[in-house]
Amino acid sequence: MDEVTVDPWSHYDVLCEDKNIKLMYDVQTNRSHRNQVVASIIFKNLTSQYIKKMEFNVIDSLNMKLVRQMGASSRDPVEVPFILLPNMTNEGQFAFIVDSIVMAQWLRGTLTYITNDGESSTSEKLDFKINFPVSIHIQQQHIS
C-alpha cells in the first residue's frame, strides 16, 4: 500500500516571503480568552545561513491590538523567541486583543531579522498584511 504524505501546513496561508525566509500563518480564536485570537506563524529558513534576532510587529487598529510585553508601547515589536538554523522551520504564536468583530481586519506588519553566514551579518526587513476574517469568530456548537 502506498503511503500518502500530508503537508502539515497545508491549511496555512502564505503571509510573506523573500529570498531568505517564508512566513505562513493560520488564525484561530483563543478558546480560553474570547476576546483574543492567535496567529500561528510558521517561520521557514530558505537559506544555508542562520536567521536570528527576528522581531515581529504590526500596526494596531482601533479594533485589534497585538499583545506585547508588559510596559511595551504599541510601536514596540515582539521578539521571536528562537533563531532559525539553516533550512529549519519553527512556529511562533502571537495573540491579538479583539475589541470588535463587525468586519474583517487587515493589519500591516513587518518582520525584521538578521542573516548570518558565520563571517558577516545582514539586516533584513519584510513587510506583510495579515488578514483576520470575521469567520474565525464563529464557534462550533454541538446540537443535542
Image (cartoon, rainbow, N blue to C red):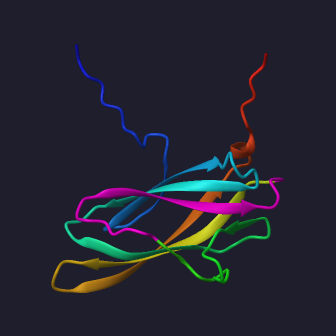
- Residue 51, percent from left and from top: 31, 72
Count of numbered circles in the view? 0
Image quadrant occupied by the N terminus: top left
The answer to which quarter of the image holds residue 46 is: bottom left
- Residue at 36%, 38% in the rendered image: 7
Q: Is residue 94 magenta?
A: yes
Where residue 13 appears, x then y in whole percent?
A: 50, 49
Q: Quadrant of the C terminus?
A: top right
Name the residue at 81% across, 61% down. 99
- Please provide percent x and percent y for residue 61: 74, 70
Left or right of residue 78, residue 139 in this image: right
Magenta span contains residue 23: no
Q: Which residues are magenta?
A: 80-102
In the picture shown, does residue 9 fall above or below 99?
above
Q: Is residue 65 left or right of residue 27?
A: right
Q: Quadrant of residue 141?
A: top right
Dividing the picture into quadrants, the one containing residue 62 is bottom right
Q: In percent of the image, x 69 and y 72: which residue is there?
A: 60
